[in-house]
Structure formats: C-alpha cells, structure tokens
Image (cartoon, helix red, strand yellow):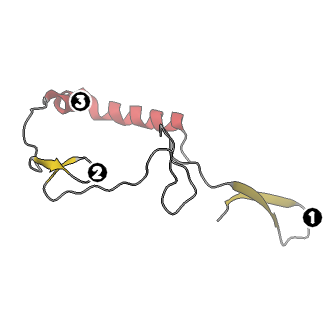
Amino acid sequence: MMDRRGSLRTSAAAGAALGPAFWRSAYAETAEPGVGPYGAPAGPDKNGLWLPEGFRSRVMARSGLPVAGTTYLWPIFPTAPPPSPPRRRLPLRSSSASSSCTSIPVTAG
C-alpha cells in the first residue's frame, strides 16, 4: 500500500519526467468564458445545479445525516474518505509440528 510520501514522491518523479515543455503547453491555454463543449447550462435542476442538456445530478449524501443504506453519518465538512471497516487480528495455526502461532489483519464484514 502506498503512503502519502510515496504518492508525492511518485507524482514528483512523473512530473519531472514529463519535462518543462509539457507543463508550459499544459498551462499555456487560458480559459475562455462561454458555452463549453457540452452545451450551455439549461437552468437549475431539482438539486439546484445548472447542468447542460442531457446531464443529471443526484444527492449522494447530506452533511450531518446518515448516508442512505448505512449507519455512517456524513461529516459536516468532509475532507477525508470515510473510515475503513474495523480490522482485527485472527490467529492462524500452521500445520507444522511447531506450536508457533501467527496472525494476519483481516477486514470485518
């Protein structure tokens, strides 16, 4: 599993490998106001979002309320992914003659 530092290190290496010419061209284009490639916004939908024709939105969760079908309470200021399921260690016995016991982490559920 990659940790935050490993992810940053990989990102920095990938960014450096692309070279300065790539980044100059990537940031060279300026945003232009107007109709985007998907069309003009058609007005607010039932959730209050202005989306182009053919697009739709849905509410996945609301701050301070349980997520549908779960007991997870959606945070007021979500800044991180939901917590992982609890982990516990289960002892495993080998079939060898030794009496040693080892354990491995498993996810409940």
Q: Looking at the image, is mark 2 or mark 1 nearer the viewer? A: 2
Q: Which residue has dot 3 on it?
A: 23
Under mark 3, the amino acid is Trp
Classify 107 as above or below 26: below
Under mark 2, the amino acid is Asn
For the point 7% across and 37% down, which residue is it? 34
Mark nearer the N terminus (1 vs 3): 3
For the point 91% across and 65% down, which residue is it? 98
> How dense is the environment of label 3, judged by Cα within 10 Å: few (below 14), some, or many (20 and up)?
few
Q: Which residue has dot 2 on it?
A: 47
Classify 95 as above or below 71: below
For the point 56% across and 53% down, which residue is it? 72
Using residue 76 as the reference point, say whether residue 88 is left or right of it: right
Classify 108 as above or below 17: below
Mark nearer the N terminus (2 vs 3): 3
Q: CA distance from mark 2 to mark 1?
A: 62 Å
Residues under numbered marks 2 and 3 in contact, where contact means CB atoms less than 8 Å apart: no
Using residue 54 as the reference point, say whether residue 63 is left or right of it: right
Using residue 103 as the reference point, say whether residue 7 is left or right of it: left
Q: CA distance from mark 2 to mark 3?
A: 37 Å
Under mark 1, the amino acid is Ser
For the point 28% across and 55% down, which residue is it? 57
Mark nearer the N terminus (2 vs 1): 2
> How dense is the environment of label 1, judged by Cα within 10 Å: few (below 14), some, or many (20 and up)?
few
Q: Where residue 53 appears, x then y in whole percent?
A: 13, 56
Q: Which residue has dot 1 on it?
A: 99
Quick one: SS at disc 1? loop
